[in-house]
Amino acid sequence: MTSADSLPEALRGISALDNGRSILLVTGPPAAGKSTVTRMLAETLNRSALLDGDFVARLVVNGYVWPLGEPADEAARQVALCNQNLCDLARNIATAGITPVIDWIVPDREQFDVFTSALGGLGLCTVVLAPDPAVCVERNLQRDERERFDFDDHAGLLARMGDAFGDDALWVDSTHLSAEETVDRIMGELGE
């Protein structure tokens, strides 16, 4: 990151995450709080854009297959397309001086490498929301039935993410944190 003293006067006092100087990728298991936290992060920054991976994936209308759906080869092809589209959008937005905040489940190193290869040189900051798996299950059950995500391997997914990201991400155990506290923690860790 650039030191605060070397920044132009107009950018001093602005978060190091702001004005397209970084790209935030927020991931975690279903019902970890990604949608709420990414919306609040985007609202915290002066110039930001929220890139919802679920929305981008569902740009495919006829023939859409969800990431764990069948046929598996088509699901994988559409996930790869969504990953590439998110990277392209994030690059374009960051180049325009606006900070992209990406909300998307990135479950493994192969997919993470897509983001690091495409966006690593643009200040990619990855955050893994990692609440206790039981909290994710409970949050999912509290959702409107139409918004529930049928998934029962939160612990396994978090373990795979641990192998995939390791120290290349900020891990936030948000089990006992409100969304506001989670955002404050992320901004405190990454925004200086």
Image: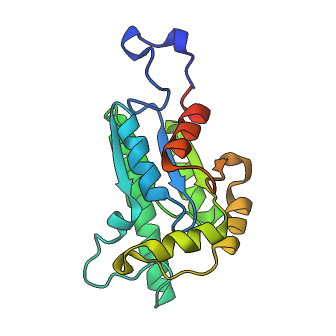
* Residue 36 % position (x, y): 43, 54
* Horizontal arrangement in the rendering, residue 97 relative to residue 13 (left or right): left
* Residue 143 % position (x, y): 42, 72
Residue at left 39%, top 83%? Answer: 65
* Figure check: 140 above or below 55: below
* Residue nearest the viewer, comparing 173 with 50: 173
Residue at left 41%, top 45%? Answer: 40
Q: Quadrant of the C terminus?
A: top right
Q: Please tell me how many numbered marks the rendered image carries.
A: 0
* Figure check: 38 above or below 55: above
* Figure check: 31 above or below 96: below
Residue at left 58%, top 34%? Answer: 190
* Residue nearest the viewer, comparing 84 with 53: 53
* Horizontal arrangement in the rendering, residue 190 relative to residue 65 (left or right): right
Instruction: Describe the colour scheme in one phrase.
Output: rainbow
* Residue 35 % position (x, y): 42, 57
